[in-house]
Amino acid sequence: MSHSNRCAACKSLRRRCPKDCVLAPYFPPTNPQRFACVHKIFGASNITKMLEQLPVHLRAMVADCMSFEASSRMEDPIYGSVRIISRLQEQIIEAQSELVFENT
Amino acid sequence: MSHSNRCAACKSLRRRCPKDCVLAPYFPPTNPQRFACVHKIFGASNITKMLEQLPVHLRAMVADCMSFEASSRMEDPIYGSVRIISRLQEQIIEAQSELVFENT
């Protein structure tokens, strides 16, 4: 038995969406861009594997984190999420220098 | 014509390593783990595509950032590199609170 409304993943992969589809809860048909993004960066089989490996209560988080990483890499094909890490590290260095300055 | 010593990618994919192999400069045979990691998370075709899309002088950086992201996800299959981002954001909040405290 399949959903009347296929999830974004099954729609994109042109397959029927089974009632127990692993991807459906995290990739609703209302947001096709979210699946397109993780599909392009990680591939559909990797996302499916990642979700299946984890207990159900952790899957929403892994889907969110993978979506975030994938969209970071789409926006910045060189640095991806590492760009955000570098910026935050710079901010910490600035804040720490300011603290040192305040304390002298 | 192929290398006498295949790169980590070609060795892992059990194919000959051509002289102009896109992956060879960034995945030397001395570090098979580095390729195994990005292969598992992004897939070999995605890494190849990412590298090919970019000019040669930027490829080492994308290989490094993808390796970093992939190893973060191997270490932490739920949060991946997002874990590092959250920790850094917490550190910034702490440093900022400390600054506010110092200024009062």
Image (cartoon, coloured by chain):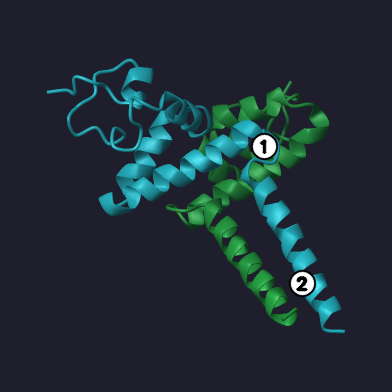
Chain colours: A green, B cyan
| Label 1 crowd (10 A; few <14 / some 14-19 / many >=20) | many
Task: Give whichever of A13, A50 is nearer the camera.
Answer: A50
Secondary structure of the residue carrying numbered label 1: loop
Query: As shown in the figure, which amino acid type bears the numbered disc 1?
Result: Cys
Residue A28 is at least partly visible in this image: no
Q: Is residue A69 above or below residue A56?
A: below
As drawn, the residue found furthest toward the left would be: B1
Splitting the image into 4 quarters, where does residue B49 fall? top left
Q: Which residue is mark 1?
A: A7
Query: As shown in the figure, which amino acid type bears the numbered disc 2?
Result: Gln
Q: Are marks 2 and 1 on the same chain?
A: no
Q: Which residue is mark 2?
A: B96
Secondary structure of the residue carrying numbered label 2: helix
Q: Position of residue B74 (x, y in %)?
A: 60, 31
Q: Position of residue A79 (x, y in %)?
A: 47, 53
How far is disc 2 from disc 1 in space, using C-alphas?
Answer: 42 Å
Q: Is residue A98 above or below residue A36?
A: below
Select label 2 or label 1 by which is in front. Answer: 2
